[in-house]
RNA sequence: GGGCGAGUGGCGAAAUGGCAGACGCGCCGGCCUUAGGAGCCGGUGUCACGUGAGUGACGUGAGGGUUCGACCCCCUCCUCGCCCACCA
């Protein structure tokens, strides 16, 4: 038991890690001075968490590499701000309340307490002094304030609309309804439609601006998803009129949106959404029963019917006609559920020859199909079109279109619109898929909407000085997901701020995505009392330099945050119009079964156990090492031992450079043919080359290769352990570089070794995390010789060690003299010799 | 049906036009040990040949193309994952 190795104690994370965490806390090392303008500011933000009560490996996977980025930036002299907080409103608290008869606030509080402790065990450089908890009235008061401001600015409004309604969770946003089966994103229940008066935010006003990503360093897939979600499409709005008949005089306008005005002559019928306002008026008495039955069924059965997108089309004729403005022809009006009330004008002109859905509909109901667009030079199809011709070629021409015959389709688009426009029957139009943001929730555990309803004055916004409207402390749950605010007279009954008469409060609360749409502004001044944001700090510190989080928020949180920033800028609250300059989406860590981690699947990985066994540094490093950060993947702790071993070896290198390993026959002696000077050159060279690549890896968030490079350096140093150069100047420099490079990723063990190193040198303690990132010594990093692969016709036939800096002619002569090359040439003369990649490789090309 | 992403050893992966498999796990052998589930050293893509140092062929989901040269670029297809889905 008295081997060399046991002379030093083993690394014991369980004592070292908490000690340094406490020390950092004591010193306030990560409390950012937001007023300090002597250094460049770096706002580092990671998505705040819902306080579910348990931190799992996924949380570590996002946060610890983000922390490494912050520590890396600090070592470059940046003033880094890295806050944390909790997204504390939301349904699980209410579900727990209903189930366990515990107040949502208590449940949330105790979860937060637990998660704070778990978060601290990461050893991350969070600035806890700026923590934000959204269910605190000191936070949600400002949600209410912003709502009132948006109301004044015309950005918030109330409207009755059919909304997606979940029996458990109340109203859902469009994007909270998932999949073809239209299930609730939280509880999975089937979603129905219901008419309710709701509050909306006018995100559509910013549709075009939200399509502009210039100046943003965001992942391409997120930009594409947002672009598709906004769904801008350019076309024309065209005015059809209803034709007179026995039951109504006609002349009503029927507006349709189309992206293909060049197909207008092929419009052989019209289709209205069942909810279209003119349906009742146009339907003659003898058709009423059937039409009303269809409208009723499409409302009731929409969810079930739309399970399948390729089910047969359904619809009924109204029994009225419309007049096609281009040729005055009467065409029948139908209603069908494939036309959506909420998109465009809720009515279409059907051109079966050139639209797949219209084609299917016309085929099903025997409606005429008139070909009006044809590929250049093509003949009329015999026996009619077999399918809709929908492709758009520049060379397509218009046919069967009166005086437009022979026009190329793209020109015809404009010609038709211009013509109808001059007659007041059409205009260019743009529509978007994106809808205004429905923010009302029929829930208790959220921000109360600060308006009252008064018999005399109608909808009255509360004055700013009456904020916050607090959630009542006592809640009467009756075991359902229903909103208990509606049964609370003390909350409900109030007086009208305008007339002083009796009034009732709004009982809906705000979507929790409101909270997360501006929280990073509040981090900068969480206790600021004169408004939601401290303008001076916000102007200095935003936009956020780096945001990290999951891609699942692509069209929700990340889009709402952009909208909020623009809306707040237009209200004069902030200057910048974009929240996050650079965005990185790390991948998802899945359960060992490859499924998303969830309690119900029982595949949640508890990091606390791993931390207890290996220490936080090992867990952090392992998560960075397991693969590219943006990839994620199924979780498996297999291999974590390798990372633990690496840190153990770094520990040994730092504290016991002269030890001799019993199992290593070469231990203590320099490699064959190497003297001490050569060994020191090799060590310095490797250290500085590692520094160069590791620096680049940190910049690019390539943490897996960063760790690999540090392992290589550690392996190299281990080779020299116990030799004459161990502990010498080159060794010492390399070891210092190793610790500095490792510090952002493994902050505790490096801090411990750094402190011992300073003590051993008689220097005063300073944290490794306040050291400067070292500079590469290019001379030391340079190599004198390199191995040159020699290819013949692209296949490697030989390798030769050559001096760096030989001319191509010299290399060529040397290479052609190699016996293996001569053999491979087989007496033939090279056609040419390619020196590739700046001398990295030579390829000798033989023809034939 | 549409969009995005991914397919490389037994496993996590590296290499983004220039030596395929760095680094790590696992496995095999050795050292040290009362012991080894600790630590250290070495080996490890597949196949064939060779006692051996080694030599040769094959090899990045499939097929084609561009190139002196392709895991990487282009085309066609297959498989898997995520997101969206009648958007006129």
Image (tube, coloured by chain):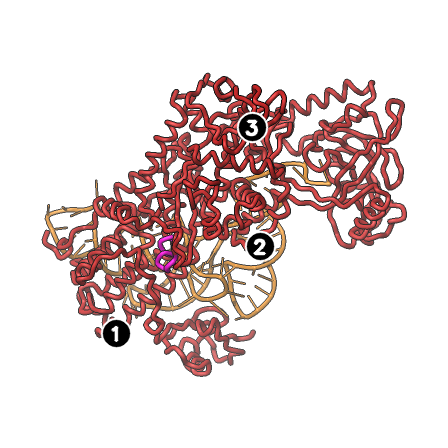
Chain colours: A red, B orange
Residue A414, how many percent across, how many down? 80, 50
- Which residue position holds label 3? A451
Q: Position of residue A523 (x, y in %)?
A: 42, 44
User: From the image, which quarter does the C terminus of chain A lie in?
Assistant: bottom right
User: Sequence order check: which comes first, mark 2 or mark 3?
Assistant: 2
Chain of the residue that carries numbered disc 2 in the rendered image: A
Q: Residues within 10 Å of mark 2 (few under 14, many from 20)?
A: few
Q: Residues within 10 Å of mark 3 (few under 14, many from 20)?
A: many
Residue matched to label 2: A214
Magenta stretch: helix, strand or loop mostly: helix
In the image, A94 versus A225, the foreground residue is A94
| Residue A571 visible somewhere in the drawing | yes
Q: Position of residue A616 (x, y in %)?
A: 29, 45
Q: Give the chain of mark 3.
A: A
Q: Between marks 2 and 1, how big is the CA–CA gap?
A: 52 Å
**Residue tagged 1:** A678
Label 3 near label 2: C-beta < 8 Å?
Answer: no
Residue B81 coordinates in the image, percent (x, y): 50, 41
A660 in relation to A729, above or below: above
C-alpha gap between disc 1 and disc 3: 79 Å
Q: Is residue A622 visible?
A: no
Farthest residue, direction front:
A499
- Co-location on one chain, circles 2 and 3: yes
Magenta span:
A69-78
State the SS at label 1.
helix
- In the image, which is nearer the foreground, mark 2 or mark 1? 2
**Nearest the camera: A95 or A840?**
A95
Q: Residue at x 81, y 48 (%)?
A: A374
Earlier in the chain: of badge 2 and badge 1, it is 2
Q: Is residue A717 magenta?
A: no
């Amino acid at each position: 038991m008295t081997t060399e190795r046991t002379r030093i104690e083993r690394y014991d994370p369980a004592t070292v890690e908490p000690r340094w965490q406490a020390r950092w806390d004591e010193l306030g090392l990560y409390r950012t001075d937001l007023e300090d303008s002597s250094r460049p500011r770096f706002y580092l933000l990671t998505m705040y968490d819902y306080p579910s009560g348990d931190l799992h490996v996924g949380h570590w996977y996002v946060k610890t590499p983000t922390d490494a980025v912050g520590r890396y930036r600090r070592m470059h002299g940046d003033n880094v701000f890295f806050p944390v907080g909790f997204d504390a409103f939301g349904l699980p608290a209410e579900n727990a309340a209903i189930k366990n008869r515990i107040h949502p606030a208590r449940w949330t509080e105790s979860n937060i307490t637990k998660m704070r402790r778990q978060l601290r065990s990461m050893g991350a450089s969070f600035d806890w002094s700026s923590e934000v908890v959204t269910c605190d009235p000191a936070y949600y008061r400002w949600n209410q304030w912003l709502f009132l401001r948006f109301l004044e600015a015309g950005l918030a409004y109330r409207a009755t609309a059919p909304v997606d309604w979940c029996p458990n969770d109340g109203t859902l946003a469009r994007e909270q309804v998932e999949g073809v089966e239209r299930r609730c994103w939280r509880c999975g229940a089937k979603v129905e439609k219901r008419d309710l008066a709701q509050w909306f935010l006018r995100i559509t006003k910013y549709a075009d601006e939200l399509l502009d990503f210039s100046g943003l360093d965001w992942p391409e897939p997120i930009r594409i998803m947002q672009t598709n979600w906004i769904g801008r499409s350019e076309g024309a709005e065209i005015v059809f009129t209803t034709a007179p008949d026995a039951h109504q005089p006609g002349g009503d306008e029927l507006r349709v949106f189309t992206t293909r005005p060049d197909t207008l002559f092929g419009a052989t019928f019209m289709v209205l959404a069942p909810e279209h306002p003119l349906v009742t008026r146009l339907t003659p008495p003898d058709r009423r029963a059937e039409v009303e039955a269809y409208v009723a069924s499409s409302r009731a059965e929409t969810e079930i019917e739309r399970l399948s997108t390729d089910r047969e089309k359904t619809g009924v004729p109204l029994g009225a006609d419309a007049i096609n403005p281009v040729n005055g022809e009467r065409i029948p009006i139908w209603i069908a559920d494939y036309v959506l009330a909420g998109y465009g004008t809720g009515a279409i002109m059907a051109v079966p020859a050139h639209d797949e859905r219209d084609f299917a509909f016309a085929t099903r109901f025997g409606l005429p199909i008139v070909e009006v667009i044809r590929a250049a030079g093509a003949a009329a199809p015999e026996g009619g079109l077999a399918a809709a011709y929908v492709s758009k070629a520049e060379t397509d021409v218009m046919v069967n279109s009166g005086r437009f015959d022979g026009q190329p389709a793209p020109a015809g688009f404009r010609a038709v619109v211009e013509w109808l426009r001059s007659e007041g029957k059409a205009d260019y139009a743009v529509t978007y898929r994106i809808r205004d943001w429905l923010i009302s929730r029929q829930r208790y555990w959220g921000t109360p909407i600060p308006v009252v309803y008064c018999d005399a004055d109608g909808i009255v916004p509360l004055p700013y000085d009456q904020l916050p409207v607090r959630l009542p402390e006592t809640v009467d749950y009756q075991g359902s997901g229903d909103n208990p605010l509606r049964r609370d007279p003390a909350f409900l009954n109030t007086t009208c701020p305008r007339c002083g008469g009796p009034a009732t409060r709004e009982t809906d609360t705000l979507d929790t995505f409101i909270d997360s749409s501006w929280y990073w502004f509040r981090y900068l001044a969480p206790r600021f009392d004169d408004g939601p944001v401290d303008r001076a700090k916000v102007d200095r510190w935003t936009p956020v330099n780096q945001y990290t989080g999951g891609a699942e928020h692509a069209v929700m949180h990340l889009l709402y945050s952009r909208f909020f920033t623009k809306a707040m800028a237009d209200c004069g609250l902030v200057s910048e119009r974009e929240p996050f300059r650079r965005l990185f989406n790390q991948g998802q860590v899945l359960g060992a079964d490859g499924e998303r981690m969830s309690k119900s699947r029982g595949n949640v990985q508890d990091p606390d156990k791993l931390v207890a066994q290996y220490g936080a540094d090992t867990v952090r490093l392992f998560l960075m090492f397991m693969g590219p950060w943006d990839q994620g993947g199924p979780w498996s702790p297999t291999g974590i031992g390798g990372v633990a071993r690496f840190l153990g070896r770094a520990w040994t290198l730092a504290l016991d450079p002269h030890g001799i390993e019993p199992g290593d026959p070469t231990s203590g002696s320099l490699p064959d043919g190497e003297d001490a000077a050569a060994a020191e050159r090799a060590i310095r060279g490797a250290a500085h080359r590692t520094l160069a690549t590791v620096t680049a890896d940190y910049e690019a968030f390539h943490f897996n290769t960063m760790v690999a490079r540090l392992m290589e350096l550690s392996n190299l140093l281990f080779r020299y352990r116990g030799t004459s150069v161990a502990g010498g100047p080159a060794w010492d420099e390399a070891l210092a570089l190793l610790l500095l490079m490792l510090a952002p990723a493994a902050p505790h063990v490096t801090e411990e070794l750094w402190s011992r190193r300073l003590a051993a040198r008689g220097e005063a303690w300073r944290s490794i995390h306040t050291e400067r990132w070292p500079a590469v010594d290019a001379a030391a990093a340079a190599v004198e010789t390199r191995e040159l692969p020699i290819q013949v016709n692209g296949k490697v036939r030989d390798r030769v060690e050559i001096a760096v800096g030989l001319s191509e002619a010299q290399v060529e002569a040397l290479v052609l003299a190699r016996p293996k090359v001569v053999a491979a040439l087989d007496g033939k003369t090279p056609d040419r010799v390619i020196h590739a990649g700046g001398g990295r490789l030579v390829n000798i090309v033989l023809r034939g």
